[in-house]
Image (spheres, rainbow, N blue to C red):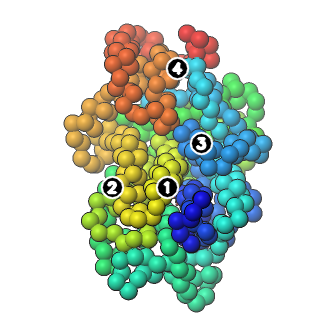
Amino acid sequence: MARTGNHAVVIGASMGGLLAARVLADFYERVSVLERDSLPVGAAARKGVPQGRHAHALLPKGAEIVEGLFPGISRELVERGAVPINMGQPIRWFDGEGYRCRFPSDIDAIGMSRPLLEDQVRARLLTLPNVHAVDDCEVQGLAASADRGRVTGVRIRRGKGAEEEVLTADLVVDASGRGSQAPAWLQSLGYDAPTEDRIRVDIGYTTRLYRRRPDDLDGDLFLLVGPTRAVKRFSFFQSQENDQWLVSLGGYLGDHAPSDDAGFLAFARGLPAPDVYDAIKDAEPLSEPVTHKFPANQRRRYDRLTRVPDGLVVFGDALCSFNPTYGQGMTVASLEAAALQRCLSTGAQGLPRRFYKEAAKVIDVAWNIAAGGDLRFPEVEGPRPPMVKFFNWYMHKLQRAAHRDPVVAGVFVRAFAFIDPPTVLLGPGVMARVLRGNLRRTARDRTRYQVPMRSQAQA
Ligand SMILES: Cc1cc2nc3c(=O)[nH]c(=O)nc-3n(C[C@H](O)[C@H](O)[C@H](O)COP(=O)(O)OP(=O)(O)OC[C@H]3O[C@@H](n4cnc5c(N)ncnc54)[C@H](O)[C@@H]3O)c2cc1C
């Protein structure tokens, strides 16, 4: 295939950067992935990706795209100990009011730590002959043409105290995460910085590893506990490699789990459902609890800029970072990778603008689910147009119906996993079931703690 350009540079070797680099490898002679951290040997957490120590789910659509970019990678992950999890069965999901019922599903997810996923993706990427990673390399800013119409590379420092050098490139992809400096870099070249949409949630995660025994949770492999209006706490209880449970406890609006033994357990006890506390009170911890704070959903509107330079594309969390409890970031990065691939297949002319337009379609969906969903809590500040109010009202009803109706539960999970567009939730058949499900609510439905039996899938 004829190449689109000679050299592409990616800033950041986290999931966003790795996926972008994989796509670029098909279009550029050489791809350099520049990373500020020292890259670990093997699956290990690192400083530049502090969130990697906390629960991370790759949603099925993201997994499908990653598999397309790196054929066989799902099997390789399972060979390294990741746990295949059918989306309809061994998942216990308390949504704040009740447990979603189980349903027959042909969709699988994979339970694994974030470092394992990143390590395997990085290993596969670096087998490509035209891709290389440069670690301990911090990007300081952009280089540009004399008329500043085009980004021509990056200014870098290889290691502390090293001289600044310029690395020239036909295309720079900034995948440096939510702290990206691209807005300031653009301003220094005479462009406007993008405006920013923010919905504050002040979320905190506290995470600890435990030994996993086969009978834990009666054999279930994933447990989610969602917040209620009154108790805005949540938990992810995720099976992963090395027979471990990764248990993240969290809360909205400053209600964060402590990182000492007693405080961690007490917080678990105060979750809206008892399963997590019951499972960890006698379990064997394998690590100390670690914490991470996430202040706000943050979307930078590069798609609304009237002037952007050629040669620079902002990608992944640098473009939009979502409340992590919806588990979307890596899947949105995968969808952006697919969008970048489509855009590059028609050449590099006007690439940034075309890419931002395509990415905005993906981000709109995810933003409406995450930031829009957060607005169901009256304490979360932000604009609530009638559509947001309706969607949150309807989702509440749909979740209720999904406690008993396997069809509604299945439709919801497919949309949540980005397999189907969210519009399927509003199809007439689904709406009728949601209505019926809410009319038929019984005293039994109003009781919180009824973990659904596996056999419900056959109901
Ligand atoms: C607590 C938490 C839980 C999450 N859970 C999920 C989940 O369940 N599912 C999901 O899909 N997503 C989840 N996410 C989001 C997910 O982690 C990100 O979407 C994903 O990592 C993709 O981000 P990224 O690669 O764009 O940026 P990041 O992951 O932030 O990576 C940026 C990279 O750029 C490097 N870098 C930064 N500046 C420079 C520089 N100047 N020069 C060189 N390198 C630089 C950093 O060292 C880092 O490696 C979660 C996030 C948080 C905070």
Query: Crowding at label 3, few (<14), some or many (≥20) Cα neighbours within 10 Å?
Result: many
Q: Which of pointers 4 and 2 lies earlier in the amino acid sequence?
A: 4
Residue 10 picture location, percent across and down = 55, 67
Q: Is residue 204 left or right of residue 31?
A: left
Residue at 25% x, 36% y is 387
Query: Which residue has dot 4 on it?
Result: 101
Query: Which residue has dot 3 on it?
Result: 63
Q: Nearer the viewer, residue 157 or 264?
A: 157
Residue 364 picture location, percent across and down = 36, 46
Query: Crowding at label 2, few (<14), some or many (≥20) Cα neighbours within 10 Å?
Result: some
Q: Give the residue type that dot 2 points to.
A: Arg
The local secondary structure at tag 4 comes to loop
Question: In the rendering, which numbered label is found on residue 198?
Answer: 2
Q: Closer to us: mark 4 or mark 3?
A: 3
Q: Closer to us: mark 3 or mark 1?
A: 1
Q: Closer to us: mark 4 or mark 1?
A: 1
Question: In the rendering, which numbered label is found on residue 345?
Answer: 1
Q: Distance of mark 3 from mark 1, alpha carbons?
A: 22 Å
Q: Nearer the viewer, residue 274 or 134?
A: 134
Q: Which of pointers 4 and 3 lies earlier in the amino acid sequence?
A: 3
